[in-house]
Amino acid sequence: MPPKMASVASSSRFCYLALRDGYKQFNNSEDIIFEHSCRIKGVNATANLDAYIPKANIYFEVKCHEIFSQHSIYLKKSYWNLLYGQENDFGFSYAKCPDIDEFKIELCNFGIAKTKIRFDIKQFLCHLWGIASQKDKDIPAKLVYLFFNKMDLIEQWGTGIQRIINRAKEYELPKPEFREIGNTFRVNLYRKADKKPIKADKRADKNR
């Protein structure tokens, strides 16, 4: 039996960890949109991606459920060469998509020892189509696939990073902090600086 896979709701968490832990120079960017959707022009559909950095025009998609999935296509070097005619392995390597000017695809491996994994080619094409529909950016787009080996994070953390970030902005609160504790996450939300802290219960002090 394969190990427990992370659900779709967990994907944004993996993506957050990748950005927090040093995806190049963008790990400290405050302008990251999680659970981002690209409207596909001309059809009634959207391409759903796990994160987007508008200033750099980079889209992120987490792949942690693909390893033991039932997809019929293997994403391996020979197949990638068939598509793009150049070398691409599971590292920080690049390939050009012939249908989009200067469009880049990057595969980032986080601990996967396999030489090939099953891949959802229909979703892949949907992502390309959705990103290609975004024609209002001067910076060439890049799609980054993040392949994770660790997939045992469980659903104890809430409903998504972006929702928590949005709620903090809505109430003009300081930026929340996210911290991984074992296989769960802790989120620290802060009050406004001008608010007084809650006074400790005197009865609790006596019992110390």
Image (tube, rainbow, N blue to C red):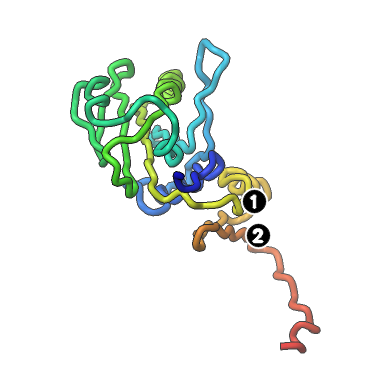
Mark 2 burial class by Cα count in 10 Å: few <14, some 14-19, many 20+: few
Identify which residue, 28 or 14, lies in the foreground: 14
Identify which residue, 35 or 80, lies in the foreground: 80
Q: Position of residue 153 (x, y in %)?
A: 51, 52
Tag 2: residue type? Lys
Quarter occupied by residue 138: top left
Q: Residue at x 23, y 30 (%)?
A: 77
Relative to 104, residue 107 above or below: below
Q: Residue at x 71, y 88 (%)?
A: 208
From the image, tell me which residue sits under label 1.
172
- Image-based side of 61 in relation to 202, left or right: left
Verify CB contact (< 8 Å) between mark 1 and mark 2: yes
- Image-based side of 34 in relation to 85, left or right: right
Q: Position of residue 135 (x, y in %)?
A: 42, 19
- Image-based side of 95 in relation to 182, left or right: left
Relative to 114, residue 101 above or below: above
Dot 2 falls on a residue whose secondary structure is: loop
From the image, tell me which residue sits under label 2.
192
